[in-house]
């Protein structure tokens, strides 16, 4: 289904952050929506209808996630360097985190919730020129104190972030490095125990974007600049590539993010380009869990 058209004010539309709310609807953000435009969109995937639930004049929202404890919608504001939370109706907006961290401004892109409710956020510094400077970070925001800790730095523009099903490892995709790193954490979740490159993507003209992880531990890696999704197992084997139908692909250039409906194997991808912003569905290899619902 088509959700958005290219905005005259920005010359683009870029759908991101699909996440299912408790009401069963799918929530999206439009990164390039202009001031007053629909920045958070609620989609009834059965009826194929959509409506705007939030807008403002200043943000660029890049991802969305439902809080596992409070059921609120959490979104990253790339321009404001912040994470906001709101009701599913787009009201009661709160700023739950804002940079800088260690004196460096934040460019938050994606987020994931740890087992104790702490936030894990990719700081996508390096996504713009000069691309070759690895200045991105992975940040943890403690669920109790709200304090921010740098878990990893000097990374080439971190983007997607998702825990393994057992929540014993963290997968991070690096947009300008075209790779996915695997991090394990100390028992408190506030320090990295091990970290190394795990998957090198053959993305060609594309760049790795957001990540979803299913109940079997498979990784669904969206691409920016190429309307495809690369699906790997946790040993780095490329299992399949999800592609847009040939008759549609001409006006679509990115398939950046994925959500698998919890408890089902029905997956949804946000796909965008000069033809507009679309949702496509496909059959995942395993059922959806919290780690495959937004981020």
Image (tube, helix red, strand yellow):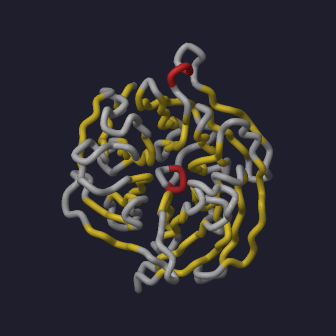
Position of 213 relative to 279 (above/below): below
Tell me the quarter of the picture where residue 177 sits: bottom right
Q: Residue at x 30, y 41 (%)?
A: 42
Look at 79% across and 52% down and name the residue there: 235
Compared across the picture, whether 224 is left or right of 9 comes to: right
Front in this rendered view, residue 237 or 137:
137
* Number of on-image labels: 0
Residue 46 quadrant: top left
3 or 186, nearer to the observer: 3
Q: Is residue 194 left or right of residue 81?
A: right
Residue 278: percent from the left, percent from the top?
A: 43, 30
Q: Position of residue 204 (x, y in %)?
A: 73, 37
Residue 91 percent across, percent down from the top left: 19, 58
- Quadrant location of the N terminus? top left
Q: Is residue 273 left or right of residue 152?
A: left
- Rendered position, 53 above or below 146: above
Residue 88 lies left or right of residue 160; in this view the side is: left
Residue lying at 49% horizontally and 61% vertically, measured from the top left: 111
Answer whether residue 3 is visible to the viewer in this image. Answer: no
Task: Please say whether residue 290 is visible from this viewpoint.
Answer: yes
* Image quadrant where residue 253 sits: top right
Q: Residue at x 35, y 50 (%)?
A: 21
Single out the residue that lies furthest toward the top. Answer: 247
Q: Position of residue 182 (x, y in %)?
A: 71, 63
Is 23 rendered above or below residue 74? Answer: above
């Amino acid at each position: 289904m088509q959700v958005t058209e290219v905005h005259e004010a920005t010359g683009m539309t870029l759908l991101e952050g699909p996440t299912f709310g408790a009401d069963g609807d799918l929530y999206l953000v439009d990164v390039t929506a202009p001031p007053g435009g629909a920045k958070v969109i609620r989609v009834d995937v059965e009826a194929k209808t959509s409506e705007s639930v939030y807008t403002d004049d200043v943000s660029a929202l890049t991802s969305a996630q439902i809080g596992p404890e409070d059921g609120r919608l959490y979104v990253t504001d790339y321009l404001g360097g912040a994470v906001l939370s709101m009701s599913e109706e787009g009201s009661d907006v709160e700023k739950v985190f804002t940079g800088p961290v260690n004196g460096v401004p934040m460019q938050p892109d994606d987020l994931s919730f740890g087992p104790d409710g702490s936030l894990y956020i990719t700081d996508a510094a390096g996504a713009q020129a000069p691309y070759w400077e690895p200045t991105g970070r992975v940040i943890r925001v403690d669920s109790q104190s709200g304090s921010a800790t740098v878990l990893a730095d000097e990374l080439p523009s971190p983007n997607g972030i998702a825990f393994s099903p057992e929540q014993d490892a963290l997968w991070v995709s690096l947009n300008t490095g075209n790779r996915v790193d695997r991090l394990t954490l100390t028992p408190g979740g506030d320090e990295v125990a091990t970290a190394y490159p795990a998957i090198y993507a053959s993305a060609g003209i594309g760049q790795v974007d957001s990540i979803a992880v299913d109940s079997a531990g498979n990784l669904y890696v969206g691409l920016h600049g190429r309307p495809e999704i690369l699906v790997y197992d946790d040993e780095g084997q490329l299992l399949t590539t999800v592609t847009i139908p040939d008759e549609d692909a001409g006006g679509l250039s990115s398939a950046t993010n994925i959500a698998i409906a919890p408890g089902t194997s029905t997956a949804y991808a946000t796909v965008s380009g000069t033809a507009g912003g679309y949702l496509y569905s496909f059959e995942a290899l395993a059922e959806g869990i919290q780690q495959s619902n937004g981020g």
